[in-house]
Amino acid sequence: MELESISTPNNNSSKNGVGKKFLIISISLTVLLNLSVAIWFFIYVQQNGLDKFLIK
């Protein structure tokens, strides 16, 4: 008895679509997180000065 591999075009395309969507969402969330940290840093430095941010 031999096992045969059965592949359908719809199955492969749906997996690729989910992977691309996940990649786009993860990159978008990473960029959003980095921008929010950068904005917080600049606001903090403007209010308190860079000396309070750096520990000496």
Image: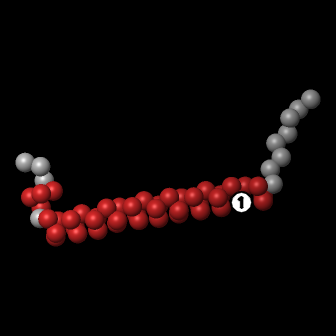
- Tell me the quarter of the image containing the N terminus: top right
Q: Secondary structure at mark 1?
A: helix
Q: Residues within 10 Å of mark 1 (few under 14, many from 20)?
A: few
**Residue at far front of view:** 48
The structure residue drawn at horizontal position 72% and vertical position 55%, both measured from the top left corner, is: 12
Closer to the camera in the image, 3 or 14: 14
Horizontal arrangement in the rendering, residue 34 relative to residue 5 (left or right) = left
**How far from the left and from the top, in percent, is residue 4?**
85, 39
**How far from the left and from the top, in percent, is residue 47?**
16, 69
Disc 1 residue type (three-letter): Ser
Horizontal arrangement in the rendering, residue 9 relative to residue 48 (left or right) = right
- Quarter of the image where one finds residue 11: bottom right
Image label count? 1
**Residue at far right of view:** 1
The structure residue drawn at horizontal position 42% and vertical position 59%, both measured from the top left corner, is: 30
Horizontal arrangement in the rendering, residue 45 relative to residue 19 (left or right) = left
Q: Relative to residue 45, is residue 56 depicted above or below? A: above
**How far from the left and from the top, in percent, is residue 55?**
12, 49
Closer to the camera in the image, 47 or 34: 47
Horizontal arrangement in the rendering, residue 30 relative to residue 54 (left or right) = right
**Residue at far top of view:** 1
Q: Residue under label 1, please give it.
A: 13
- Quarter of the image where one finds residue 42: bottom left
- Quarter of the image where one finds residue 48: bottom left
